Image (tube, grey):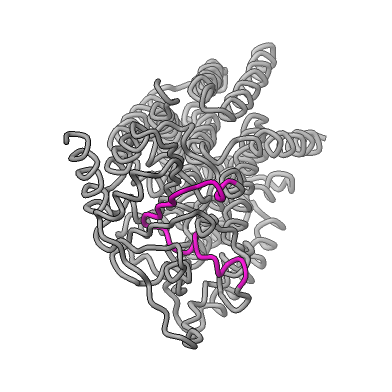
Amino acid sequence: MNMEIFINFTYIISCMLFAFGLKMLGSPVTARKGNFISMSGMLLAVVVTLLSNHIITFQWIILGMVIGASAGAFTAYRAAMTQMPETIALLHGFGGLASLLVDWSAYHNHPTANLMISIPTFLSVVIGGVTFTGSCVAWGKLSERLPGKSIKFPGMQFVNIAILISLVVGGFIFISDPINNYPIFLAIMAVSFIFGIFLVIPIGGADMPVVISVLNSYSGLVACTTGFVINNTVLIVVGALVGANGIILSIIMCKAMNRSLTNVLFGGFAPTVKAKSDGEKKEAKSMSLEDAYLVLEAAKSVVIVPGYGLAVAQAQHAVRELSELLEKNGCEVRFAIHPVAGRMPGHMNVLLAESNIPYDQLVEMEAINPTFDTVDVAIVIGANDVVNPAARHDKASPIYGMPIIDVDKARTVFVLKRSMATGFAGVENELFYYENTSMIFGDAKQTLQGLIAEFKASAAA
Amino acid sequence: MDFIYLLFILALSIFLGFVIISRVPPLLHTPLMSEANAISGITVIGAVIAAGSEIGSPFTIILATTSVALATYNVVGGYLITEKMLKMFKKKGQ
């Protein structure tokens, strides 16, 4: 009994360390220390659990831990920063499955008629199953092993409704008599696995940041329900923290796209291929590298707006080099980061940090927008919809109301782009036709390298 | 009573989570998510108890051992990935 109290007391300390660790992620200065504190909380919780007198044999624990730890270390070592979204999606899935298996073995060993256990068991299996297969599909889409675009088949909605009804009915049968309904339990699990696939497969690549966040919160919820099943407080606390994390990030992502969560998860973005009002045939100006160099050379304040296209072109290092040359030339350089730049929350910041751009130069959308009046040049690289001024005033535009980066208010705007093609949402970008906008066509990386060469040549002369 | 007491903890933890996490800047949202992954591997505690306490059917041993492996994967992978990312965030001139 004393041991039990000691273990639970240690769990309280672990929970506090987890909470502190997350709190210290509030600033890049303390974040690494926070991660370390969180790690020590985890170590403490695991070690004290191993001391529990419930544990008789260690061979299976050791086997599982060795496999898991080496695979985890290998994944972390291998994962490139551009691959973070799919790696994290996979981790969500494994977390969900791990919790599900704990509940399954608890149920297999001691099926009980206690409602306070059978209800959380049912919820764990459903949420855990959905998290697992849903995350696998998200992983496939993000790593381009599955087609990234929305996949739908006729009657899908009816199938989903049928699944939902069968889960509810199955749940009632299971909860009313868990001891004699093992087959129902297995059926619920199988249906949940299928449900997870159907929920994620119709969601397009552009909406993946939301899906990852939602799956994150699911993986927290399963840990929570598992905590109820095995009567463990740390699982409940941590599950709640992770669940809250996922919900907050989902809301932030949805706001940044000006869409509701239900619209993202069940609606599917209808690409309104609305014939645009071709009143006057507008013409976009293009600019040569030499002229662009002259403008940049005279600039005192430059804002760079990176989109995922920058990472696709592998141009992060070129952009850092250009920003260093500009600074050497006495110019202030900042990067404007839209919340949905990249493929998961905060992804663009990680990509830029990787190429050694100091984080004090990475500025959030809300902070940078009021300062555009004083900006000489805004350079848009691989971003499109997030700088479309139509979002501010054109009520007919499908992206109307979406918060954007106000680059059009800068004195001059450069848009680095391959062609005049539209963005994710398939919307024409009126920014390209503005008086103060110049297009610099070509591969973003080559364009940047061209500008860098111009700067270096003039420095040498 | 146990159930109510656990719900009580749940309610307060959700509140705590919202307060702490809403203060994390968008700059660190990706490391935040991988950190969340790492701590959600806390399931390893339940898995460890399941794998060590029952010398029951081979089937439960398989379930529990797999669960230990998956949860440990989350813990180790999650923390190392977070560290890998956070290491790159540098202040100017650092």
Which stretch did the figure color magenta? Answer: A371-393
Residue B84, position as x, y percentages in the image: 38, 30
Determine the image quadrant of residue A176: bottom right
Q: Quadrant of the N terminus of chain A?
A: top right
Magenta includes A391? yes
The residue shown at (47%, 58%) is: A208
Query: Which percent across, then down, holds residue A332?
Result: 44, 37
Q: Quadrant of residue A114?
A: top right
* Image position of A255 with respect to A161: above or below: above
- From the viewer's side, name the closer residue of A453 and B22: A453
* Left/right of residue A110 with respect to residue A137 in the rendered view: right
Image: A349 above or below A261: above
Residue at coordinates 51% horizontally, 86% vertically from top-left?
A277
Q: Position of residue A23 (x, y in %)?
A: 62, 27
Quadrant housing the C terminus of chain A = top left
| In the image: residue A282, left or right of residue B23 | left
Between A25 and A405, which is closer to the camera in this rendering?
A405
- Residue at 65% in and 35% down: B23
Q: Is residue A176 left or right of residue A198?
A: right
Q: Position of residue B88 (x, y in %)?
A: 38, 29
Q: Nearer the viewer, residue A108 or A323?
A: A323
